[in-house]
Amino acid sequence: MKPGPRLTDWLLLLGSLAFTVVAALLLVAGRDARGAIACLTFFGMCTAVATWILVLKLRMRASADAVRVSIVGGVAIPSRDSLRWIGGAGLAVGGSILVWSGAAIGVVFQGLSVFMAGAGVTLMVLLATKRVGGHSLTFSPEGLRVANGAESFVVRWTNLAAVDAAEFHSNPVVLLHVRDADEVVATAKGPDVERARRRVARMIQKNRGWVGCDVFFIPYHFGLDAVLLTKALAGYAAHPERRAELALHWLPAGDRRDGDSRPGPE
């Protein structure tokens, strides 16, 4: 994938913004206030999402010239679950507004709005009960450890066949292809090792069917840039002599916080 936004990304932003402005003008003019609020809410949410995706892709374009990317090893990079909370709250609040204001548009629209609000509430409940989130990535001389709560598995550098930056439903993602999926499954650990291995095997099977790879990440969930993460993974897989730098480095107090292991271009 060529880093950066596509023409469709710009058109989506401009179209959403145009409809948002029209809805705002209708609301100011006092014409069908509820219908105008529904349109303003819906297209406002579309504009926010389009802007967010565009910003991510512009950052990816800026990272394209990085030649070498290094990471502090041995320190877990936690998922930023606050982003999921924001998304869940946005769906819940936006969907609720659309349910109230969408009667002027139609029953089908209101039904979809109920589904939207329900999805937002469900996501927040899953986050609150620790059923979603809590992931982390840790770079080590052995490979990349992917943890989900008490369970984890390792993609060893020697097992990483290819890594690519791509898009999944317009979201920047990083795709990992391994040489031996059974080796990944064998690295799984947790309170119940057999259960952890079954989970990893199912994950790989689903990823192959949905995304066409063995393991994939949505980098912004970890506060990472897709291009920099891809280059870091590819660099350590291709250059064995660099893996020793991923041994845990203790820096003086105040120089680094736990989890401060973001990729840095050189």
Image (cartoon, helix red, strand yellow):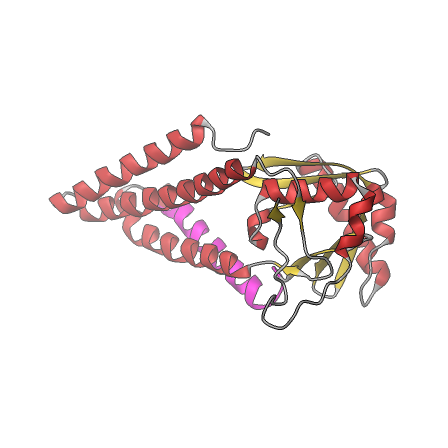
96 or 44: nearer the eye?
A: 44
x and y percentages locating residue 227 in the rendered image:
60, 40
Q: Is residue 253 visible?
A: yes
Q: Residue at x 86, y 40 (%)?
A: 180
Q: Residue at x 70, y 34 (%)?
A: 212
187 or 235: nearer the eye?
A: 235
- 53 horizontally vs 185: left or right: left
- 134 horizontally vs 185: left or right: left
Q: Is residue 122 visible?
A: no
Q: Residue at x 51, y 35 (%)?
A: 61
The part of the image, by quadrant, that contains residue 145 is: bottom right
Q: Residue at x 76, y 59 (%)?
A: 152
Is residue 59 in the magenta section? Answer: no
Q: Residue furthest top?
A: 7
The part of the image, by quadrant, that contains residue 29 is: top left
- From the image, which quarter does the C terminus lie in? top right
- 104 horizontally vs 31: left or right: right
x and y percentages locating residue 192 in the rendered image:
83, 65
Q: Is residue 86 above or below residue 172?
A: below
x and y percentages locating residue 159 in the rendered image:
83, 42
| Number of numbered discs visible in the structure rendering | 0
Is residue 119 in the magenta section? Answer: yes
x and y percentages locating residue 203 in the rendered image:
74, 47
Start-end of magenta stretch? 110-133
- From the image, which quarter does the N terminus lie in? top right
Magenta stretch: dominant secondary structure: helix
